[in-house]
Image (tube, helix red, strand yellow):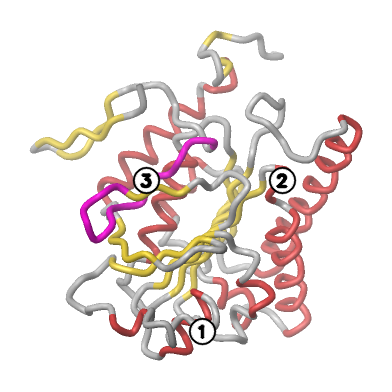
Amino acid sequence: MSPVLVADGSGVSLQAGLPLSIFDPVYIGIDEFGDPVTLQLIYRNLLAGGLMDTGKSAIINLAVAHAALSLDCKLALFDGKQVEMGQWRPCAEVFVGPDIVHAISVLRRLQIMMDNRYSYLVACGRRKIKRTDVFVPYLIAIDEIAYFTTVAGDKKQQEDFSKLLRDLVARGRAVGIITVAATQRPSHDIIPTSLRDLFSWRFAGRCTTDSSSDVILGFGWEKKGWSATALSVDNPGSGLLIAENGSPRLVKTAYLDDRTCAAIAAYAANMRATASTHDHRTQRPVLVAA
């Protein structure tokens, strides 16, 4: 049984249950027929783009919430504004605010970890990690790519951040490094084609131009009748979701308000605080060093 949200007159709470798993599908909303939509994030990456209040932050928050409730996943959060993912800070191994030097340092550490994991897989004669491995997947969540690639620091630091991120997105999947990222400015200088195509899942919220929509979904979809410019301003959270080698699908993301996020984050943080004394796969107590 997984944790269940319970709402009453005094607020939102969670009924206790077994942790989720990052190897399980992540619920993100419904499609145009009302059917549930889930994403398989393990061995995948997710890119979301679009204007404000178009669902991109909602889908990132849903991925982070699922990861926070999964004891077999650790979180590295990047948020230049600090408030979009600030509530998840107690659940994260590391939280990066408006500090490009810290951001680059964390990405380099993750890159070293990625290389060490590949060395382990080579030694084991394997190509990717499994649910039963002793090390767990990492979810890298970046609320606004453009802040770290065009605003913070100098050009050299921005280029360093971009190169490190591209490497992690390109090579990290097989060793359990999942990247979910969002941007309000879906343009070629922010999301070049070579980076976009590394994201297996892409979500386009409402955009102002067809070219911005194509930056997220892929070149040519506007000519085939799929453009995020056609999404209604009166339907927040609606967007076009596409998987690699797939076709766009109209979906409406679920929404976690501040109170709900706070309740989930508090539950997840408490669950993680006691995880060092339990095996999250069996829920049995384990010995820890004093």
As helix, strand or loop, the secondary structure at mark 3 comes to strand
Is the residue under label 3 in contact with that under label 2 (CB below 8 Å)? no
The local crowd at label 2, few if under 14, some if 14 to 19, many if 20 or more residues have their Cα within 10 Å, is many
Where is residue 268? Give x, y as percent: 43, 34
Find residue 157 and report its horizontal and vertical position in percent: 75, 76
Span colored in magenta: 23-36
Q: Position of residue 39 (x, y in %)?
A: 45, 49
Q: Identify the residue at image location x=82%, y=50%.
A: 112
- Residue located beneath label 2 in the image: 174
Going by the numbered disc 2, the residue's amino acid type is Ala
Q: Residue at coordinates 30% horizontally, 71% vertically from top-left?
A: 53
Q: Amino acid at mark 3?
A: Tyr
Q: Nearer the viewer, mark 1 or mark 2?
A: 1
Residue at image position (49%, 65%) is 202
The answer to which of marks 2 and 3 sits earlier in the sequence is 3
Quarter of the image with the N terminus in it: top left
Left or right placement of residue 90 versus residue 105 in this view: left
* Vertical side of 70 occupied by 109: above or below: below
> In which quadrant is the C terminus drawn?
top right
The amino acid type, in three-letter code, at marker 1 is Gly
